[in-house]
Image: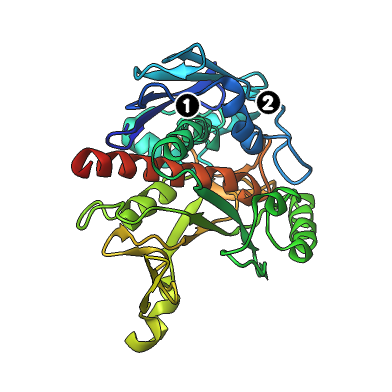
Amino acid sequence: MSSSFGNLFRISTWGESHGGGVGVVIDGCPPNIELNEADIQVDLDRRKPGQSEIVTPRDEADQCEILSGVFEGKTLGTPIAILVRNKDARPEAYSEMKDKFRPSHADYTYQAKYGIRNWQGGGRASARETIGRVAAATVAKKILRARFAPDLEIIAWVKSVSDIVADVDPDTVDFDTVESNIVRTGDLQAADKMIELIKIMRGEGNSVGGVVECVIRQVPPGLGEPVFDKLEADLGKAMLSLPACKGFEVGSGFAGCLMTGREHNDPYYMEDGRVRTRSNRSGGIQGGISNGENIIFRLAFKPTATIMSAQQTVSSDHQDTELTGRGRHDPCVLPRAVPMVEAMAALVLCDHALRQSAQNG
């Protein structure tokens, strides 16, 4: 199983949803970066379950422990190991899934690939795996701000829940507004409607999906590679590796297909000695390389696969059967996906910044 991500800044996540714990090993972190557990905990608290009435009620503190790679508050340059112990695992809630494949989950495909699977909460397929990514991203953001982009901002928000669309300007949205509401959108009027819909879905034992949008500001130009490791290609791989993510677009995305070249091009101009673009349909990336404008992209997240009603399925001995969802699940993954999206963006940018520095100084 490929559980590692990145080149020079490389992370390997480990652990299962209902095992002893989950975590990450980070390799390639430069020395002398200030880091402590409290830094990491801020982002883990935004990702953890049980934080509001519209997410899973699983009761986990998600308290992190740094096991290696940090001494007297600074990174050593050696591998950093971070552990989060599982405290509220309830594997018995999934006993029926031992012999039945949950529709649209990874149960059948894991069984087909490996001939064995951890049926307790989905094992590695659970979104609990993303704890390691979020923890590692705290380190990535510290490296970026200390060495490459001191004013870097990575802000994601819920753009839509089903057909409720938030009116958010990527150039001006701020972190505090997004964090001020439990659905994590930048449009407070849309927030109430989104929250109400998610509550309805939860009450019906159903689920709902939507779109997360993200902006990265103050990115230096020159990050990314021109062919296979284009910045948008690596961002796309990173985002599509998130649980429940089914689509990715950058800049104008699919809407650009409806424009002419004259409409879509971003004219250049000079401002205070800096090359700028008057529009940003490229989404801050041209030729696979950052151009210094805001990087803007969107992700489509499907409805949570577990629903609390009977569905047709197949048993592990290949018999038609029926299964009703059990356990504790998010009726909508979007609010908790926001910090995960930001995390993957930070990991990609940090890796490319280190690669740029290694190649070009």
Quadrant position of residue 163: bottom right
Residue, disc 2? 60
Instruction: State the SS at label 2.
Output: loop
Mark 1 secondary-structure assignment: loop
- Find disc 1 in the rendering and name its residue: 118
Name the residue type under label 2.
Answer: Glu
Q: Earlier in the sequence, mark 1 or mark 2?
A: 2
Disc 2: CA contacts within 10 A as few (<14), some (14-19) or many (>=20): some
Viewer-side residue, 162 vs 261: 261
Q: Residue at x 52, y 46 (%)?
A: 342
- The residue lying toward the viewer, choosing from 271 and 4, is 271
Q: What amino acid is found at the position of numbered circle 1 in the picture?
A: Asn
Residue drawn at 74 percent across, 60 percent down:
194
Task: Kindly report the distance in space between the C-alpha atoms of the residues bearing marks 1 and 2.
Answer: 20 Å
Image quadrant where residue 45 sits: top right
Q: Position of residue 360 (x, y in %)?
A: 20, 44
Across and down, in percent, residue 65 comes to 55, 16
Side (left or right) of 269 relative to 102: left
Q: Is residue 194 left or right of residue 154?
A: right
